[in-house]
Amino acid sequence: MRMTTTLLLMLSTVLCNSPAFTQSDAKSDLTLNRSVLRYYNGLEIQAFENESPGEYQALANYFTSSFIVSPKKCIQCDVNYNDFFNQDLFNIVEFESTRHQTDTVSFLFKDKYNVMLLPLSALTVSLNGIDVSSMSELVAPRPLPEWNPTGNDSEDYEIYKRDLKVWIRDFPEKYRTLTSGSSITKIRVAEFLNLPSARRNAFTATPGTYLIID
């Protein structure tokens, strides 16, 4: 009986510490962090994480680790980050102007937390070279625009061309890489519009693999 109880306790400990039982909070999961959600929605955060992990890590480091926080009444105690970010609404962007280049800056937040901003000089590596002033203005990754046929080729191309122009503006380096390589198929719009419907559909069947150009 005693051995059975011991085994159950051990199993409970293992399970509770396994990934399936690990509880996310506003520090470990940016989609639960209201300070981040003020600037990026959940889909954008997931796009950063899946398609641009370097930028995602920079966002995580900036919004949750570019400062040190502790409860005012117990410096050694753990911080409840759900309360800190989502109830008390701490947002590092609002205090960025007080950060110093080489020295730490400390202040009391809502008479509940001691906050110490790390110096700018200490953030360069953790932010992957992204300037702190840009941390709330990054453009979330998104795929190339798709051709969406409505039956009106002229209007369809104008919409596609407009969307492509915006995509190129947002991701100029990606566009240069795509157009200088062979990983994508490029076709003139006149040639594309002269294709039979079946061939058009086959050409556009896989989003992100083609460019229709003038």
Image (cartoon, grey):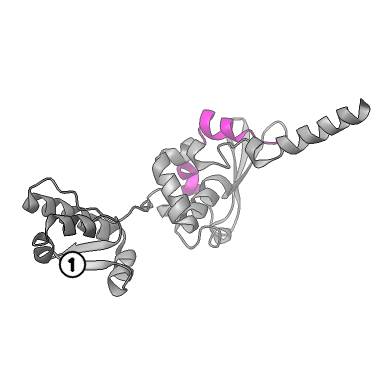
Q: Is residue 148 something one can see in this rendering?
A: yes
Task: Please give the name of the residue rendered at 24% of the width and 53% of the height, measured from the top-left corner.
Answer: 146
Q: Residue at x 56, y 50 (%)?
A: 66
- The residue nearer to you, when weighing 112 against 136, is 136
Secondary structure under badge 1?
strand
Q: Give the image quarter of residue 195.
A: bottom left
Q: Which residues are magenta?
A: 78-98
Closest to the observer, 172 or 90:
172
x then y, percent, for residue 86 = 52, 31
- Magenta stretch: residue 155 in it? no
| Quadrant of the image occupied by residue 181 | bottom left
Left or right: 20 in relation to 144:
right
Q: Where, quadrant-wise, is the C terminus in this rendering?
A: bottom left
Q: Mark 1 is on which residue type?
A: Ile
Residue 35, horizontal then vertical, whole percent: 47, 38
Q: Is residue 79 on the magenta stretch?
A: yes
The foreground one among 21 and 96 is 21
Instruction: Please name the residue that numbered disc 1 is placed on.
Output: 187
Relative to 31, residue 122 above or below: below
Q: What secondary structure prevails in the magenta region?
A: helix
In the image: residue 154, left or right of residue 83: left
